[in-house]
């Protein structure tokens, strides 16, 4: 080191270059995911009433205004959070549940639901808090009704196929 100037090590420089190479879409995806993760924790710990756009941005380590830019409204952020939780759950269930048939398939899905709730209680609590908040006549209630109907239809289909297999 000359002139008393402190330089960062190669690892820090490489990390800075990687960040510089990210596209705007990649940076947005990363920040949006971080905001949704922060929102999930807030909803799991304090309920949907405690969630604000500003609070989610701040908890994620971004500006308080960024969630407003991305989502526009709290309802839109909650809808995105529901989609985020459900997509994550769908990915995990596809990786975990074997292609079984009949009663085994139904049992595998029930076991997965219980095990996944133990593995990721924050997502489960956030999702259940959102479902319970969606009891009123709001846009959220329509989404909750749709999700509930899809879940019931999926379980009914598993039961139907189990009965057909004997």
Image: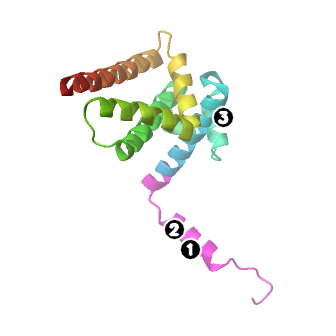
Can you see residue 120? Answer: no
In the image, residue 120 lies at what x, y percent?
A: 55, 39
Main SS class of the magenta portion in the image:
helix
Quadrant position of residue 92: top left
Tally of marks: 3
**Camera-side residue: 4 or 58?**
58
Residue that lies at the very extreme toward the left in this rendered image: 164
Residue 27 lies, in percent from the top left, at 49, 54
Task: Give the x, y percent position of residue 74.
Answer: 54, 27
Query: Can you tell which mark lies on residue 14?
Result: 1
- Residue projecting furthest to the front: 166
Q: Which residues are magenta?
A: 1-28
Secondary structure of the residue carrying tag 1 is: helix
Q: Looking at the image, which residue sits at the far bottom?
A: 2
Whether 149 is drawn above or below 79: the answer is above
Residue 55: which disc? 3
Quadrant in the picture for the C terminus: top left
Q: Is residue 59 visible?
A: yes
Measure the C-alpha gap from mark 1 to mark 2: 6 Å
* Disc 1 packing (10 Å; few <14; some 14–19; many ≥20): few
Q: Which residue is mark 2?
A: 18
Q: Residue at x 60, y 40 (%)?
A: 38
Q: In this rendering, is residue 74 above or below 7?
A: above
Q: Secondary structure at mark 3?
A: helix
**Percent position (x, y) of residue 10?**
62, 79
């Amino acid at each position: 080191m000359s002139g008393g100037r402190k330089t960062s090590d190669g690892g820090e420089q490489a990390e800075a270059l990687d960040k510089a190479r990210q596209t705007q879409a990649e940076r947005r995806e990363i920040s949006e995911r971080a905001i949704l993760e922060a929102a999930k924790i807030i909803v799991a710990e304090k309920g949907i009433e405690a969630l604000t756009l500003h609070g989610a941005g701040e908890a994620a380590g971004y500006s308080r205004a960024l969630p407003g830019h991305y989502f526009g409204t709290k309802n839109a952020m909650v809808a995105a959070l529901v989609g985020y939780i459900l997509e994550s759950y769908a990915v995990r269930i596809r990786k975990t549940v074997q292609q079984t048939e009949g009663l085994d398939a139904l049992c595998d899905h029930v076991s997965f639901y219980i095990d996944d709730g133990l593995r990721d209680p924050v997502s489960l609590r956030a999702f259940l808090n959102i479902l319970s908040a969606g009891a009123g006549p709001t846009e959220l209630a329509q989404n909750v009704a749709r999700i509930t109907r899809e879940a019931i239809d999926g379980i009914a289909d598993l039961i139907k196929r189990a009965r057909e297999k004997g």
